[in-house]
Image: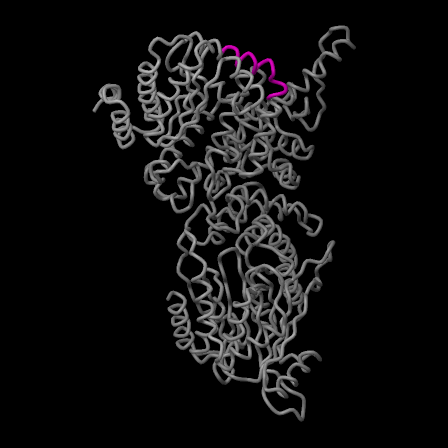
């Protein structure tokens, strides 16, 4: 059926005809995007015009007006109909009857309706009081009735908007800022609101309103296309969900991607992020221009009076060769020649970041249009300016985004294209890959006084995740890319090797510290061999902290910092020539010995809880001490089932295990018996810690079999409905035979869940292996736990037996 046939069907058959024609239009595969939105608006126009004509016979001085998104002709499948019934006030009763003839058919079809009935004076008064109403009226479009009435209102509303622009634009900017604070930034969110988040459709509409004020205008390049892409995604979201929603939920992203003909959900998010970035950058530039114009208007009358009406040229302060500050922005000097100065973009960017000022849009565009490529390898000045830019702290971000918006970053660093706007489907990460790299450089700038080569630290921070745009292990791919980039920007062979090593091993310290036994010499030696030198270790320590801090709050804590600092201290000793001896069994502390003797005397568990807030060796205290958790010491007469029993009790009491160690304790002469000592760090998931007496009572019951831990945990899980979301990948269990000479290391990677450590402990107990120690690490929803296990006689497991234990454990966790 053609478009003409659809309109005829809608007109001939009333609401049912419109509904059928609307459904047919929305299910037509041949029509999508702007043509479909325009066709839907036109179809709806015809239907409403017919309703108005049938209900307004003999009525004069009334018109039907589309406002807001409908006024712009942008109807998504589930969009509201924003309508204003405008009248001159001469026949209120007839207008009320007409309103019923218009609104009820819309409601009967189940369409969302935002409606009002006003005279022009009432509409203008409401707009003056309510900014959102005024914004909607800026897009007013005549549908039916008295065209003069509609045109008069449009003219008056636009005049009001322009006359009141200084005050209303300030209100609009505050409204946009509040919404951004509430909804977050569209270009980084895993489940973004396409309309309300910063960089979304609301901001695009706000830019139209600024342009309508004639006070300032948004950068036009790419803005219309970005807005179209966001609308296309919203259309697909409405069609796949059947709901009027603007939130792109995780479980719906694959369907939306398919509807749009995209490869997968990552391709969809990247497209959304790219569009949002264009809108966000345009917003930044536009609001900066609005502020400049308003300041200029406020100053000009006073200045003119002082100077007798003469004009003055804006003041220009030099910042660097070819770069000056003018009116709060960084611009190019009049004598600057970008076509002869390939380092000028980096020099201007570094100067802007150092001064904490934005790069002007005009300057960036001129650079993008005229500058020559930097020679390869880069001259020393170019490399120094890049390092200066990266070391400027928080202002680096805005300057970097300005360069990126005009394509200058990918011209300087072609490998950047693969990570640009790339999503990270991990709740721990706050940012896309590219923004995370810049955030890491910003964090690393805080540590430049801690290292002897801050330039290498900053460049490694910029490149550490550059391999995420390639298949396979991103650290391995990143090492190759980092070698190429570091050589291209002019570092010598030694420095190239250091940067590549930092990128290859940027996860080494935190992974080892949280998942391996630091008392084991093999652990420390393996890190020392990978790092190679004290200088590289120093840089890697700073990069580790910067990377974690730039990831998100779940990636770094005083506990992780203390473990990494301890590992660095041990590795530094090895690199200095101190070879650690094979560890002997540590002598028990006075408290441990007291608990052990009491456990033997009573024949039952004894425990103690103690808060841990002190920084470890190598850490400088800063401000209030951050709790590292609580140390839980348990002494238990040696018996089977201790590990799963303790882990299960902690899960029941909603305690998170951060580290865990279990070993046999040598008792003083004259004391018979064998005692297991558990030295664990725990933290409450929420609320306060349970009392030690309560934990002990439950542990006694768990060990004698009178407490069904598995049943209690299952009951608790059943009481809480499962949330919809991404299906977690299956758990993986692996053996690391070279990680220790004293035990077999079995590593478990799984979705974190209450009772996970209990299930693992029970499975290892069933496999008749002894757990020497456990190292628990949780990042967001992911758990990575390493268990040092031995056979019954205390020796590492043979290779085939270790693999068998790992496979059985994996099957248990999958089940």
Q: In which quadrant of the rendered image does the N terminus lie?
A: top left
- Say if 434 sits above or below 119 in the image: below
Image coords of residue 69 (percent x, y): 43, 24
Q: Residue furthest bottom?
A: 670
Query: Residue 65, relative to residue 25: is it above or below?
Result: above
- The image position of residue 519, as x and y in percent, is 61, 72
Residue 502: x %, y % from top left: 57, 53
- Name the one closer to the observer, 89 or 639: 89
- Which residue reaches farthest right? 306
To which quarter of the image does residue 263 belong? top left
Front position in the image: 135 or 423: 135
Q: Residue furthest left?
A: 1
Residue at 56% in and 49% down: 551
- Corner quadrant of residue 661: bottom right
Q: Is residue 162 magenta?
A: yes
Residue 340 visible in this rendered orientation of the protein: no
> Residue at image x 57%, y 14%?
162
Q: Quadrant of the C terminus?
A: bottom left
217 within the magenta span = no
Tell me the quarter of the picture where residue 178 sits.
Answer: top right
How many dots with numbers? 0
Residue located at (66% from left, 45% from top): 445
Which colouring convention does the figure follow?
one colour
In this rendering, does residue 482 appear at all? yes
Q: Residue 347: image x %, image y %?
A: 63, 32
**Foreground pick, 252 / 221:** 252
* Magenta stretch: dominant secondary structure: helix
Question: Would residue 529 appear left or right of 230 to someone viewing this image?
Answer: right
Q: Which residues are magenta?
A: 155-168
| Rendered view: 77 above or below 625 | above
């Amino acid at each position: 059926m053609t478009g003409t046939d659809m309109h005829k069907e809608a007109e001939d058959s009333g609401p049912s005809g419109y509904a059928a024609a609307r459904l047919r239009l929305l299910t037509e595969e041949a029509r999508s995007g702007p043509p479909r939105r325009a066709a839907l608006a036109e179809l709806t126009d015809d239907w409403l015009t017919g309703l108005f004509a049938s209900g307004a016979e003999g009525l004069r001085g009334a018109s039907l007006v589309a406002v807001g998104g409908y006024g712009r002709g942008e109807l998504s499948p589930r969009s509201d109909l924003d309508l204003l019934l405008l009248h001159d006030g001469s026949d209120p009763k007839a207008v009320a009857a007409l309103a019923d003839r218009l609104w009820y058919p819309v409601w009967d079809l189940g369409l969302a309706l935002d409606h009002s009935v006003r005279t022009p004076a009432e509409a203008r008064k409401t707009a003056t009081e309510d900014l959102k109403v005024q914004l909607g009226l800026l897009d007013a479009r005549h549908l039916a009735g008295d065209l003069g009435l509609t045109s008069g209102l449009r003219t008056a509303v636009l005049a009001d908007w322009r006359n009141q622009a200084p005050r209303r634009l300030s209100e609009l900017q505050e409204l946009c800022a509040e919404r951004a604070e509430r909804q977050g930034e569209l270009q980084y969110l895993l489940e973004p609101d396409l309309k309300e988040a910063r960089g979304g459709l609301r901001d695009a509409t706000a830019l139209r309103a600024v342009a309508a004020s004639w006070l300032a205008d948004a950068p036009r390049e790419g803005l219309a296309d970005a807005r179209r892409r966001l609308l296309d995604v919203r259309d697909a979201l409405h069609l796949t969900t059947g709901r009027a929603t603007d939130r792109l939920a995780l479980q719906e992203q694959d369907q939306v991607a398919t509807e749009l003909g995209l490869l997968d959900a990552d391709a969809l998010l990247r497209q959304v992020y790219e569009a949002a970035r264009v809108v966000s950058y345009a917003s930044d530039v536009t609001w900066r221009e609005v502020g400049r114009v308003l300041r200029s208007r406020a100053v000009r009358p006073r200045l003119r009076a002082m100077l007798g009406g003469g004009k003055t040229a804006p003041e220009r302060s030099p910042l660097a060769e070819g770069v000056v500050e003018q009116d709060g922005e960084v611009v190019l000097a009049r004598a600057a020649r970008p076509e002869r100065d390939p380092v000028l973009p980096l020099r201007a960017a570094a100067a802007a970041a150092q001064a904490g000022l934005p790069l002007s849009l005009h300057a960036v565009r001129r650079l993008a249009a005229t500058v020559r490529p930097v020679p390869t390898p880069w001259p020393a000045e170019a490399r120094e300016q890049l390092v200066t830019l990266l070391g400027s702290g928080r202002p680096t971000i805005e300057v970097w985004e300005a360069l990126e918006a005009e394509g200058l970053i990918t011209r300087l660093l072609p490998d950047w294209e693969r990570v640009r706007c790339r999503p990270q489907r991990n709740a721990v990460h706050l940012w896309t890959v590219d923004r995370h790299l810049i955030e890491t450089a910003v964090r690393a700038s805080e540590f430049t006084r801690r290292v002897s080569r801050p330039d290498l630290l900053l460049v490694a921070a910029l490149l550490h995740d550059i391999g995420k745009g390639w298949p396979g292990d991103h650290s391995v791919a990143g090492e190759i890319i980092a070698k190429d980039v570091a050589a291209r920007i002019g570092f010598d062979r030694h420095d190239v090797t250091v940067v590549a090593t930092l990128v290859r091993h940027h996860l080494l310290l935190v992974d080892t510290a949280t998942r391996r036994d630091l008392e084991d010499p093999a652990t420390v030696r393996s890190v020392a061999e990978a790092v190679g030198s004290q200088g590289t270790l120093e840089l890697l320590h700073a990069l580790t902290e910067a990377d974690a801090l730039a990831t998100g709050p779940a990636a770094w804590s005083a506990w992780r910092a203390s473990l990494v600092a301890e590992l660095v201290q041990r590795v530094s000793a090895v690199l200095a020539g101190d070879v650690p001896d094979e560890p002997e069994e540590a002598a028990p502390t006075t408290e441990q010995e007291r608990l052990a003797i009491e456990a033997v005397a009573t024949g039952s568990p004894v425990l103690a809880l103690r808060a841990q807030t002190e920084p470890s060796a190598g850490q400088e205290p800063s401000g209030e001490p951050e709790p590292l958790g609580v140390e839980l010491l348990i002494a238990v007469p040696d018996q089977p089932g201790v590990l799963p029993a303790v882990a299960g009790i902690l899960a029941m009491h909603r305690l998170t295990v951060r580290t865990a160690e279990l070993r046999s304790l040598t008792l003083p002469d004259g004391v018979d018996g064998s005692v297991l000592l558990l030295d664990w760090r725990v933290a409450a998931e929420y609320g306060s810690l349970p009392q030690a007496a309560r934990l002990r009572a439950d542990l006694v019951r768990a060990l004698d079999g009178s407490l069904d831990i598995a049943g209690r945990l299952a009951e608790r899980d059943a009481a809480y409905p499962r949330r919809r979301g991404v299906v977690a990948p299956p758990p993986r269990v692996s053996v690391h035979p070279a990680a220790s000479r004293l035990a077999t290391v079995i590593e478990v990677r799984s979705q974190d869940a209450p009772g996970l450590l209990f299930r693992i402990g029970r499975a290892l107990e069933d496999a008749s292996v002894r757990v020497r120690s456990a190292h628990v690490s949780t990042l967001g929803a992911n758990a990575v736990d390493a268990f040092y296990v031995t056979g019954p006689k205390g020796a590492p497991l043979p290779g085939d037996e270790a693999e068998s234990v790992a496979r059985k454990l994996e099957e248990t966790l999958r089940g």
